[in-house]
Protein backbone atom coordinates (compact mmCIF):
# COMPACT_ATOMS: atom_id res chain seq x y z
CA UNK A 1 0.00 0.00 0.00
CA UNK A 2 2.76 2.43 0.97
CA UNK A 3 4.63 1.54 -2.23
CA UNK A 4 1.58 2.44 -4.32
CA UNK A 5 1.29 5.84 -2.58
CA UNK A 6 4.95 6.60 -3.18
CA UNK A 7 4.65 5.50 -6.79
CA UNK A 8 1.65 7.81 -7.35
CA UNK A 9 3.52 10.75 -5.88
CA UNK A 10 6.60 10.04 -7.99
CA UNK A 11 4.53 9.60 -11.16
CA UNK A 12 2.92 12.99 -10.57
CA UNK A 13 6.30 14.59 -9.97
CA UNK A 14 7.74 12.91 -13.07
CA UNK A 15 4.85 14.19 -15.19
CA UNK A 16 5.48 17.70 -13.85
CA UNK A 17 9.19 17.59 -14.60
CA UNK A 18 8.57 16.14 -18.06
CA UNK A 19 5.99 18.77 -18.97
CA UNK A 20 8.15 21.62 -17.79
CA UNK A 21 11.38 20.41 -19.37
CA UNK A 22 9.75 19.33 -22.62
CA UNK A 23 8.61 22.90 -23.23
CA UNK A 24 12.19 24.12 -22.91
CA UNK A 25 11.25 26.39 -20.01
CA UNK A 26 13.28 26.76 -16.86
CA UNK A 27 11.27 24.78 -14.31
CA UNK A 28 10.11 27.56 -11.99
CA UNK A 29 7.04 25.57 -10.97
CA UNK A 30 6.77 22.28 -9.15
CA UNK A 31 3.34 20.71 -8.82
CA UNK A 32 2.92 17.66 -6.62
CA UNK A 33 -0.31 15.75 -6.21
CA UNK A 34 0.00 14.26 -2.71
CA UNK A 35 -1.61 10.80 -2.47
CA UNK A 36 -4.14 11.49 -5.25
CA UNK A 37 -5.61 8.00 -5.01
CA UNK A 38 -7.15 9.13 -1.68
CA UNK A 39 -8.80 12.31 -2.96
CA UNK A 40 -12.54 12.67 -2.42
CA UNK A 41 -13.38 12.82 -6.12
CA UNK A 42 -14.32 9.51 -7.75
CA UNK A 43 -12.17 10.07 -10.84
CA UNK A 44 -8.98 10.06 -8.75
CA UNK A 45 -9.69 6.48 -7.66
CA UNK A 46 -9.23 5.23 -11.23
CA UNK A 47 -5.55 5.09 -12.21
CA UNK A 48 -6.08 5.97 -15.88
CA UNK A 49 -8.48 8.85 -15.15
CA UNK A 50 -6.26 10.12 -12.32
CA UNK A 51 -3.12 10.23 -14.47
CA UNK A 52 -4.82 12.09 -17.32
CA UNK A 53 -6.41 14.61 -14.91
CA UNK A 54 -3.07 15.21 -13.19
CA UNK A 55 -1.35 15.71 -16.54
CA UNK A 56 -4.06 18.13 -17.73
CA UNK A 57 -4.07 20.25 -14.57
CA UNK A 58 -0.27 20.28 -14.40
CA UNK A 59 -0.14 21.47 -18.02
CA UNK A 60 -2.59 24.28 -17.18
CA UNK A 61 -0.50 25.44 -14.21
CA UNK A 62 2.73 25.16 -16.23
CA UNK A 63 1.29 27.54 -18.84
CA UNK A 64 0.45 30.03 -16.09
CA UNK A 65 4.00 29.70 -14.78
CA UNK A 66 5.44 30.45 -18.23
CA UNK A 67 3.14 33.39 -18.71
CA UNK A 68 3.19 35.09 -15.32
CA UNK A 69 6.09 34.15 -13.06
CA UNK A 70 9.07 36.48 -13.16
CA UNK A 71 12.71 35.52 -13.54
CA UNK A 72 14.07 34.27 -10.24
CA UNK A 73 10.66 33.21 -8.93
CA UNK A 74 10.02 29.61 -7.96
CA UNK A 75 6.60 28.27 -7.06
CA UNK A 76 5.88 24.99 -5.33
CA UNK A 77 2.24 23.83 -5.29
CA UNK A 78 1.07 20.72 -3.48
CA UNK A 79 -2.43 19.51 -4.26
CA UNK A 80 -3.69 17.89 -1.05
CA UNK A 81 -7.24 17.07 -2.16
CA UNK A 82 -9.44 17.70 -5.17
CA UNK A 83 -13.06 17.53 -6.21
CA UNK A 84 -13.88 18.18 -9.83
CA UNK A 85 -16.97 20.11 -10.89
CA UNK A 86 -20.16 18.12 -10.88
CA UNK A 87 -20.92 14.63 -9.59
CA UNK A 88 -21.91 11.30 -11.03
CA UNK A 89 -25.54 10.43 -10.44
CA UNK A 90 -25.71 6.65 -10.90
CA UNK A 91 -29.49 6.58 -10.43
CA UNK A 92 -29.80 8.11 -13.92
CA UNK A 93 -29.34 4.89 -15.86
CA UNK A 94 -28.52 6.53 -19.19
CA UNK A 95 -26.16 9.12 -17.66
CA UNK A 96 -24.40 7.10 -14.94
CA UNK A 97 -20.97 7.92 -16.43
CA UNK A 98 -21.67 11.65 -16.95
CA UNK A 99 -20.89 14.37 -14.41
CA UNK A 100 -24.00 16.39 -13.65
CA UNK A 101 -23.17 20.02 -12.86
CA UNK A 102 -25.19 21.64 -10.11
CA UNK A 103 -24.85 24.74 -7.92
CA UNK A 104 -23.99 22.45 -5.02
CA UNK A 105 -21.12 20.64 -6.78
CA UNK A 106 -18.42 23.26 -7.47
CA UNK A 107 -14.79 22.36 -8.15
CA UNK A 108 -12.73 22.39 -4.96
CA UNK A 109 -8.98 22.01 -4.43
CA UNK A 110 -7.05 22.00 -1.18
CA UNK A 111 -3.62 23.47 -1.95
CA UNK A 112 -0.38 24.23 -0.14
CA UNK A 113 2.02 26.61 -1.85
CA UNK A 114 5.26 28.53 -1.47
CA UNK A 115 6.36 31.34 -3.79
CA UNK A 116 10.03 32.32 -3.61
CA UNK A 117 11.95 35.12 -5.27
CA UNK A 118 15.70 34.51 -5.41
CA UNK A 119 15.42 32.16 -2.43
CA UNK A 120 13.34 34.53 -0.26
CA UNK A 121 9.78 33.44 0.60
CA UNK A 122 7.30 35.96 -0.82
CA UNK A 123 4.14 34.04 -0.01
CA UNK A 124 3.32 30.77 1.69
CA UNK A 125 0.01 29.23 2.60
CA UNK A 126 -2.53 26.46 2.58
CA UNK A 127 -6.08 27.05 1.44
CA UNK A 128 -9.14 25.51 -0.10
CA UNK A 129 -9.88 27.02 -3.49
CA UNK A 130 -13.44 26.79 -4.76
CA UNK A 131 -15.79 28.73 -7.01
CA UNK A 132 -19.38 28.57 -5.83
CA UNK A 133 -20.43 30.55 -8.93
CA UNK A 134 -18.65 28.27 -11.40
CA UNK A 135 -21.78 27.73 -13.49
CA UNK A 136 -21.88 31.48 -14.20
CA UNK A 137 -18.49 31.49 -15.92
CA UNK A 138 -19.19 32.27 -19.60
CA UNK A 139 -15.65 31.33 -20.62
CA UNK A 140 -15.79 27.88 -19.02
CA UNK A 141 -19.40 27.27 -20.04
CA UNK A 142 -18.71 27.93 -23.71
CA UNK A 143 -15.42 26.01 -23.71
CA UNK A 144 -15.05 22.56 -25.20
CA UNK A 145 -11.84 22.15 -23.22
CA UNK A 146 -11.59 19.28 -20.76
CA UNK A 147 -11.78 20.37 -17.08
CA UNK A 148 -12.79 23.88 -18.17
CA UNK A 149 -14.37 24.87 -14.84
CA UNK A 150 -11.39 23.65 -12.81
CA UNK A 151 -8.88 25.37 -15.10
CA UNK A 152 -10.86 28.63 -15.05
CA UNK A 153 -10.96 28.56 -11.25
CA UNK A 154 -7.22 27.74 -10.98
CA UNK A 155 -6.32 30.52 -13.45
CA UNK A 156 -8.26 33.07 -11.39
CA UNK A 157 -6.69 31.81 -8.16
CA UNK A 158 -3.17 31.85 -9.67
CA UNK A 159 -3.55 35.44 -10.88
CA UNK A 160 -4.95 36.66 -7.54
CA UNK A 161 -2.39 34.88 -5.42
CA UNK A 162 0.84 35.09 -7.40
CA UNK A 163 0.46 38.00 -9.83
CA UNK A 164 -1.46 40.46 -7.66
CA UNK A 165 0.09 38.88 -4.51
CA UNK A 166 -3.23 39.02 -2.66
CA UNK A 167 -3.41 36.99 0.53
CA UNK A 168 -6.35 34.60 0.91
CA UNK A 169 -9.48 35.99 2.53
CA UNK A 170 -9.84 35.04 6.17
Image (spheres, rainbow, N blue to C red):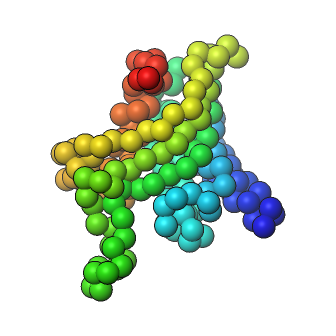
Q: Position of residue 4 (x, y in %)?
A: 75, 65
Q: Locate the N terminus by quadrant.
A: bottom right
Query: Which residue lies at the image location 40% right of the left edge and 27% below the top edge?
Result: 159
Q: Position of residue 151 (x, y in %)?
A: 38, 46
Q: Position of residue 91 (x, y in %)?
A: 32, 81
Image check: 88 left or right of 70? left
Picture layout, residue 5 above or below residue 92: above
- Can residue 30 be seen in the rendering of this structure? yes
Residue extending farthest bottom: 93
Q: Position of residue 147 (x, y in %)?
A: 38, 56
Query: Which residue lies at the image location 27% right of the left edge and 60% below the top edge?
Result: 101
- Residue nearer the viewer, 54 or 3: 3
Picture quadrant of residue 50: bottom right
Picture layout, residue 73 above or below residue 86: above
Residue extending farthest right: 3
Q: Locate the C terminus by quadrant.
A: top left
- Residue nearer the viewer, 49 or 39: 39
- Can residue 71 be seen in the rendering of this structure? no
Amino acid sequence: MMNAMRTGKYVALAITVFLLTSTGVHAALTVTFVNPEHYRDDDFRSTSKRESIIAELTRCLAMLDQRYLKDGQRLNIEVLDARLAGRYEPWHATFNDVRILRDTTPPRFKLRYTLRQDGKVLMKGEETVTDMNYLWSPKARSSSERLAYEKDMLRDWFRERFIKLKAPKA
